[in-house]
Amino acid sequence: MGALAHKPKLYEQVAEKLEDAINAGTLRAGDRLPSVRQLSLREQVSISTVLQAYLHLESVGLIETRPQSGHYVRRRERPRLAEPQVSRPATSATPVTVSALVSRVYQSMRDPNLVQMGGAWPSTELLPTRRLYRELNALTREMGDAGMLYDVPPGCPELRRQLARRSLDWGAALSPEDFIITVGAAEAIHLCLLAVARPGDTIAIESPAYYGTLQAIESLGLRALEIPCSPRHGMELDALQAALERRRVAAVLVVPSYSNPVGSCMPTANRQRLVAMLEERGVPLIEDDLYGDLHFDERRPRTCKSFDKTGNVMLCGSFSKTLAPGFRVGYVAPGRLRERVELLKFSHTVASPTLLPLAIARFLEEGGYDRHLRTLRRRLTEQVARMAEGVAEHFPEGTRVARPAGGSLLWVELPATVDSLVLHGRALEAGVSIAPGPIFSPRPDSYRNFIRLSCGQPWTPRIEGAMATVGRLVRTLM
């Protein structure tokens, strides 16, 4: 039962209303809050509940108490650190040997006793866990023995219909037949790589890149060609074009929307240019859209797939970062290689779980997913901002931090003399998990003075204390 969503206590409900008013600008910095007695009468709660709510808001830095005056919205300085510069990786393709290092680091991300700022998954407090469990319980009663049968590729027709409907929001008009259900986005990426490349082939990737992608490339005996990446705009297309003119590339793999770990978002014009560039050369584009729904602005970015005219773009995604990490429900729209990917899916895992995709399909159909996303995006916007403020407050001069417009991650460049692998070890000793930079490159000496911080946990005094601890450790390593 530990995975059940946390039911807010009464004081937390009162605090959340005030927090929403502060974040919406209804209550501004310097505004006086209602007196304890006034708020008690207005919300019809006890005075002790109001006091608890105010203490909570004060502990997370949203309000301050002025003696003999009352409670006020805190004037928070928002220092803006410089962003990391465009990456400059080596221009040669290289075998990938990152798995041993990732394995050592990953163990720490599973320790519940650590303050988790290393793993890139959302807290269960941000997820509609009870609602999904109700859907599952209803399905087990309705389906009976049918829930025990294989759901062979292409998989759950109900979910594929919902994905086709949502593809209109992505700028594409896909049909249910375009999709194949997978075990998370990781399997979708793996199947796409299997479909387009043979051992020894080269895959062009962003630099830095998600370590899971690097592990997939390593496991298939492929080589990685790192392409420079801007923390704001993603893959540098001039650099990619130059690389394509120099060597044969089997495929290009990108995360256009809020990449992991940098958080960059490729502009629409760049996406269109990328699709046309690869289409002209016959080079498949594997698009990882895992974070596309986690935009902080009003509009979702268009997918590269929306510009695809020939089926050259292989679109991958999942619900692991937005809805249910443990369900491992993903999908792929492989374009012209759909038949090959479906055969590979069958030979790889035979089928996907039967009940879990169906539970998500019902959640989508009833409108629960869109309502959940609105709340989740608001919370992540706040949490990313608070983490960035924490870096600015606690880390030493010379630190740089990316400014993502979506997702749940922060890419932090530390002063040049700081070794993030040493920092990772000392942070573990102090009870904090972080992700060191070298796991995001096939070259173990790359990004030695970078770390990735996850903003998926709600901001609490414990998180703030962990930020202060890591900042202090950084200073000791300078």
Image: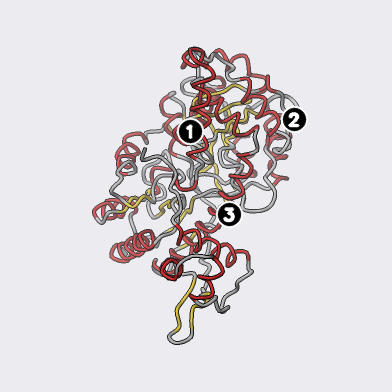
Specify few, some or many for label 1: CA neighbours under 10 Å numbering under 14, 14-19, or 20 or more: some
Name the residue tied to disc 2: 173
In this rendering, which labeled residue sits more in front, label 1 or label 2? Answer: 1
Q: Position of residue 108 (x, y in %)?
A: 30, 44
Specify few, some or many for label 2: CA neighbours under 10 Å numbering under 14, 14-19, or 20 or more: some
Q: Secondary structure at mark 2?
A: loop
79 vs 179, nearest the viewer: 179
- Residue type at mark 3: give it: Arg
- Residue type at mark 2: give it: Ala
- Residue type at mark 1: give it: Tyr
The CA span between labels 3 and 2 is 28 Å
In the displayed structure, 340 sits above or below 162; it is above
Name the residue tied to disc 3: 378
Residue 47 occupies quadrant = bottom left
Q: Quadrant of the N terminus?
A: top left
The CA span between labels 3 and 1 is 24 Å
The CA span between labels 1 and 2 is 31 Å
Q: Is 54 placed left or right of 277 in the picture?
A: left
Q: Which mark is residue 133?
A: 1
In the displayed structure, 362 sits above or below 300; it is above
